Amino acid sequence: MAFEGLTSRLQSVFSKLRGKGKVSEDDVNEAMREVRLALLEADVNFKVVKEFIAKVKEKAIGSEVMDSFTPGMVIIDIVNKELTELMGGSQAKLAKSNKPPTVIMMAGLQGAGKTTTSAKLAKLLLKQNHRPLLVAGDIYRPAAIKQLQVLGEQIGVPVFALGDGVNPVEIARQALQHAKDNSNDYLIIDTAGRLHVDEQLMEELRQIHEVTKPDEVLLVVDAMTGQDAVNVAESFHSQLELTGVVLTKLDGDTRGGAALSVKAVTGCPIKFAALGEKIDALEPFHPERMASRILGMGDMLSLIEKAQSNIDTEKAKEMERKMRNAEFTFDDFLEQMDQVKKLGPIDQIMDMIPGMGKVKQLKDVKVDEKQMGRVEAIVHSMTKQEKQNPDMINHNRRKRIALGSGTSVADVNRLIKQFDEMRRMMKQFSDMMGGPKAGKMAK
Ligand code: GDP
């Protein structure tokens, strides 16, 4: 995940301050020197770093910090607010035209993720009950049209294409008419990219702009390219008035500099962040939540939103009932794992829970997809009766399950023990809450 290096460096700066009851100006200066280095190392533009540090310092040296009994917390709060400001302050929402369709033109260099992002955005709009139409306007990259058609089919969004023999400007013009005729309220135009910014490409984009008068011109940039992403954004912006940026590949181990610099350098807000190759790995960009993630403070709001849109509430209610009644079986356990997996890669979910980033760094805590896969394999190797009635799983059965799942008896033992503990805790909790079993026992 992006920002890992920056997060751990900032956390170590702040933990030094947190231990202090009072801080001196020297302490603040020393901390700011370290924050400065951490940001530079994360590939944040040096001018941006300079201004950022000056602002934080000005606030931190004020009386608020010096007089506080928890100066560390006050400084974190200042840094949090300034990071949020740096990334745009508040969420920059997608435009909506009151004369549909809202036209969104996607631009960017080849390989930045334009085609993928166009489809992801269409999926996001579809989820919000819109009727998007995708336009295959990249006629130069071999297979770009096919790629968009395959993605469109996968998500159930129509793709307007005229092959690679028609000029993209003409394709865009006809697509706009097609959207109007078919009541599509969003038109997402995938355009051609090049390896570098060149005049011919810009001319084509300008003509598409002229013909479709887009409400949004979103530049897709690859966060992994760091400062280069910011340079690309600057040169596109100077020729094509961008309305927003989409940062892709934030799931990789990018140092994060692009996310922190692009708004400050170009004045263009980041509207979306892409965190994976999967079609639903696109999120609206919230500066305050990103700042919180960078500082290792989690992002519960995004997690709750993800849960609300992905989790089956009926199933969740049924699960809760079973937990209260201590009827929870290994089948339910599998079901629950499936629900969690719907939220996205476990590694990213952990980053959204406050404090979990730290837990992840511990050596003997392994919460990864592989580990989850092993647990699933063990449960799948149990018979139907064993899943419903775990108490019957004796030593011989454990040996058979280990063999069947390609794990060891120790792995099986560990899982059953954890499961027992989980059930015991659920029961205690249910008793405490005055669950149905508690009622019976009280009599
Ligand atoms: P285009 O040339 O700009 O249209 O780029 P594509 O949409 O074809 O994407 C280039 C590559 O980047 C593809 O392999 C995508 O799967 C991958 N990609 C796009 N977005 C992301 C992302 O957010 N994370 C990761 N890991 N890969 C991505």
Image (cartoon, helix red, strand yellow):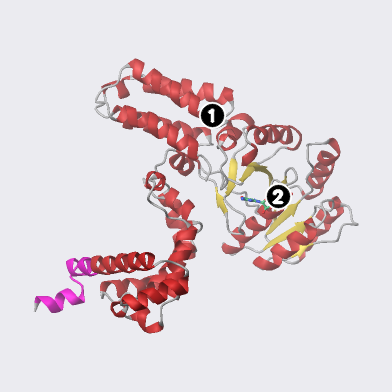
Label 2: which residue?
114
* Frontmost residue, 16 versus 342: 16
* Residue 15 image point, x, y percent: 34, 32
**Does the image show residue 101?**
no
The amino acid sitting under disc 1 is: Glu
> Does residue 73 appear left or right of residue 312 in this picture?
left
Our reading of the magenta stretch's main secondary structure is helix
Total numbered circles: 2
Marks 1/2: CA–CA distance: 28 Å
Q: Is label 2's Cβ within 8 Å of ligand 1?
A: yes
Of the two numbered discs 1 and 2 on the same chain, state the one appearing first in sequence. 1
In the displayed structure, would residue 324 be above or below residue 386? above
Q: Give the range drawn in magenta.
A: 427-442
Q: Does the magenta stretch include residue 198?
A: no
Label of residue 41 in the image: 1
**Residue placed most toward the observer, 70 or 249:** 249
